[in-house]
Amino acid sequence: MKIPLKYSWKNLAARRSTTALTAIGLALVVYVFATVLMLSEGLRRTLVTTGSRDNVMILRRGSTAEIQSSIDPEQSAVVAGFPEVALAPDGTRLVSKELLVLMVLPKRGSQKPANVTLRGLTMVGRALRPQVALAEGRWFRPGSSEIVAGNKIAAGFQGAGIGESLRFGQREWTVVGILDAGTTGFGSEIWGDVDQFRQAFRRITYSAVLFRLRADADFDAVRKRLATDPRLTVEAKRESVFYAEQSEVMVTFLTVLGMTLSVVFSLAAVIGALITMYGAVASRTREIGTLRALGFPRRAILIAFLLESSLLGLTGGVLGVLMASGMQWITVSTMNWQTFAELAFTFTLTPVIVGESLLFALTMGLLGGALPAARAARMDILAALRAG
């Protein structure tokens, strides 16, 4: 004989106050759990979507970030002449020599300084990133002291809005456009002419060379060419792989920190569920005895109370996920430990995160209900009927 599911649900509804308090406690833990996963996913997606599989990044061998890389003009010219570089319809080689520099800017409102990424690139460099478009204004003119700022930089930093100016490299630079970079990390950068940046910062070398592959299968040929050419001390990475690697340190840190906090907080939530379920068993001793007298086996009693605690956990889980879903409209700005520059991204809720959060809530409910359910199942029929 099985006890119907509605029995467990009605018992939770009958104790509205204790059920609500326990569910809220579970919901808060699930909220922390889900938001940390959303934060990690938002950071990962921002960097992963920044790169394209068709593009190849050339960096100094051993460099983990563009800011650490240095490629002299001779080596960059050799790379630009590779036969694996794709051609535009007009015959232009789709290759961009680029310079990456960090600059400190004050944030709007707080005046707090933070590192901002300056990227010097060519006109071809823009074409290699079709996911980036202009939201306002126009593109910078080659050979001029004009720059365009990512939408997240323009909104968050002084002097980065359209029509405003920034001083760096002993020059005044005018912001003539705002980039709409979608969910990519380019929204946290400022772009300008690479040759003007090299002059302003007195740099002879480039940070990286970016080019479009002629064919996907040519990537292995590029790596082999780099390994066998004694003139070159550089290595190749697909742009998508490069940016995915940029997220690894931060994602790992956030995940470990979030899981640690969630486990600590979940202990309190499990204890709350444990107390609630023990109270339910104590207040329904005669009822349990009656069920046993009617022929329901111990296993049915055990399952009924486990279902009750599971429903309690899932209720808290649904509330927690609903609370966390509101974080999707919040943009977070933090320092990327790989580049030491400011990076803005949003919380991202996915079906996988929803499933993991509900499973986490269900686990807490089961852990909180296991001992009370076992106690209810072990009750002696006569002793239970005499109670109360």
Image (spheres, helix red, strand yellow):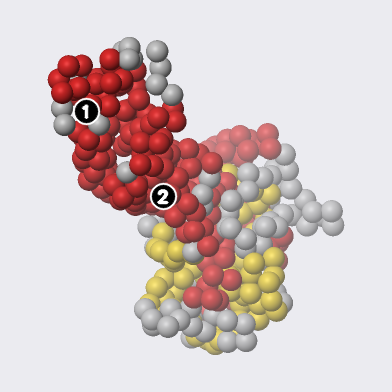
In the displayed structure image, the side of residue 88 where residue 302 appears, left or right:
left
Whether residue 186 appears in this view of the structure is yes
Q: Percent position (x, y) of residue 128? A: 68, 56
Q: In the image, which disc is placed on residue 320?
A: 2
| Residue that carries the numbered disc 1 in the rendered image | 285
Instruction: Give the farthest residue toward the right.
Output: 90
Q: Quadrant of residue 99?
A: bottom right
Amino acid type for the residue under numbered disc 1: Thr
Estimate how packed mark 1 is, as few (under 14), some (14 to 19) or many (20 or more) residues with alpha carbons within 10 Å: many
Residue shown at the point (73%, 43%) measured from the top left: 214
Q: Quadrant of residue 290?
A: top left
The 10 Å Cα crowd at callout 2, few under 14, some 14 to 19, many 20 or more, is many
SS class of the residue under badge 2? helix
Q: Position of residue 137 (x, y in %)?
A: 70, 79
Q: Secondary structure at mark 1?
A: helix
Instruction: Using the image, tell me which numbered label, if any, was put on residue 43.
Output: none
- Relative to residue 34, is residue 287 drawn left or right? left
Which quadrant would the C terminus be assigned to in this image? top left
> Which residue is more in the foreground, 231 or 50?
50
- Contact check, label 2 and label 1, Cβ < 8 Å: no
Question: Which image quadrant: the N terminus?
Answer: top left
Question: Picture coordinates of residue 331 (x, y %)?
Answer: 49, 64
- The image position of residue 144, as x and y in percent, is 65, 81
- Position of 292 with respect to 134 (left or right) is left
